[in-house]
Amino acid sequence: MNICIDSQNEIVCTTTPWNDEAVGGKSCEIESFVFSDENRLKELLNTLNQQVSHKNIKFLSTRISSNNQVLRKALVKNGFYFAEHSFRIQFNLQSNNANLWKPYSQKKLIYLSKISELEQVKNIARNNFFHGRFHEDPFISQDFASKRNMRWVESASTQGLEFLLYKIEEEVIAFLMLSAQEKSVEIYFGGSKKQSTTTPKLIASGLEFYRNKNYNKFLFNISASNLKMVNIVVRIGGKVIDSLFGYHKAYEG
């Protein structure tokens, strides 16, 4: 569902069926805003509301740069509420910072076969992840947020995303859900049974794995509330490149 006035003014939305149960109805994520001025932005948001009503969508979510004051004000005026804060992290894989993560790198890293370890990954997503846009939204229950994580993993496994796993014998201890293309790796989600000890090893192993394949960038968002993880990724060479505010809007009826 895209809202387009012209090439200078557009909102791009995608449906997020894995979120529907958590928010009590059809949901969409706004991936990007392009607008030429505040009046055009207001027009775009008004048209968005009309389309949401027509398509019976109950929930919208988006993340934007915390420095975008114009868009922040417009979203709040349009009924969106602030739900969460995250940081955009980047690792430059071919930099000298590799010396910071190499000591943590392990070789117990494999690709997830589409079926065999899926249940273990879903259980970690369901039971061992407590940060992010839905867990930090005070209007969404923790139980629904956890179920949403599980649904997301299940959906992603059928949509071509890859999984990197940290395993001890046959037990999955941690995972990263990602897309690797054009020499850049985008992490969409991850979880660990033992965050403080396993997560640095998993991230470092992923960094080294893709560095050896001549990839250049390793990117992901991390909750600003998850201070332990923020400190870990900075310690092993990650750089904060943006601050993102998450906004949500629920529609009645």
Image (cartoon, helix red, strand yellow):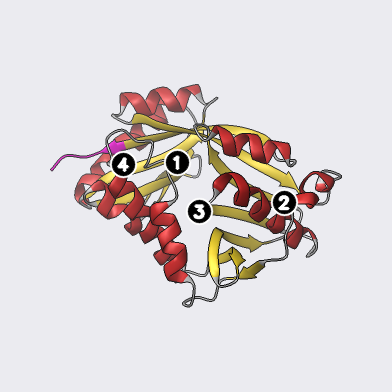
Mark in front: 2 vs 3: 3
Q: Real-space Cα distance between discs 2 and 3?
A: 26 Å
* 216 in relation to 163, above or below: above
Q: Which residue is mark 1?
A: 131
- Residue name at image x 56 percent, y 43 percent: 221
Between the residue at mark 1 and the residue at mark 4, the CA separation in whole angstroms equals: 29 Å
- Distance from disc 3 to disc 4, alpha carbons, whole Å, reads 40 Å
Chief secondary structure of the magenta portion: loop
Secondary structure, mark 4, is helix
Q: Regarding mark 1 in the picture, which secondary structure is present there?
A: loop
First in sequence: mark 1 or mark 2? 1
Residue type at the position of mark 1: His
**Is tag 1's residue or tag 4's residue first in the polypeptide sequence?**
4
Q: Residue at x 49, y 72 (%)?
A: 117
Q: Residues within 10 Å of mark 3 (few under 14, many from 20)?
A: some
> What range is drawn magenta here?
249-253
Amino acid type, callout 2? Lys
User: Label 4 is placed on what type of residue?
Assistant: Leu
Q: Nearer the viewer, mark 1 or mark 4?
A: 1
Q: Secondary structure at mark 2?
A: strand
Q: Nearest the camera: 125 or 247?
A: 125
Q: Position of residue 57 (x, y in %)?
A: 24, 49
Q: Of label 2 and label 4, which has the lower sequence position?
A: 4
The residue carrying pointer 4 sits among few (fewer than 14), some (14 to 19) or many (20 or more) residues within 10 Å by Cα, namely some
Of 21 and 73, which appears nearest the observer? 21
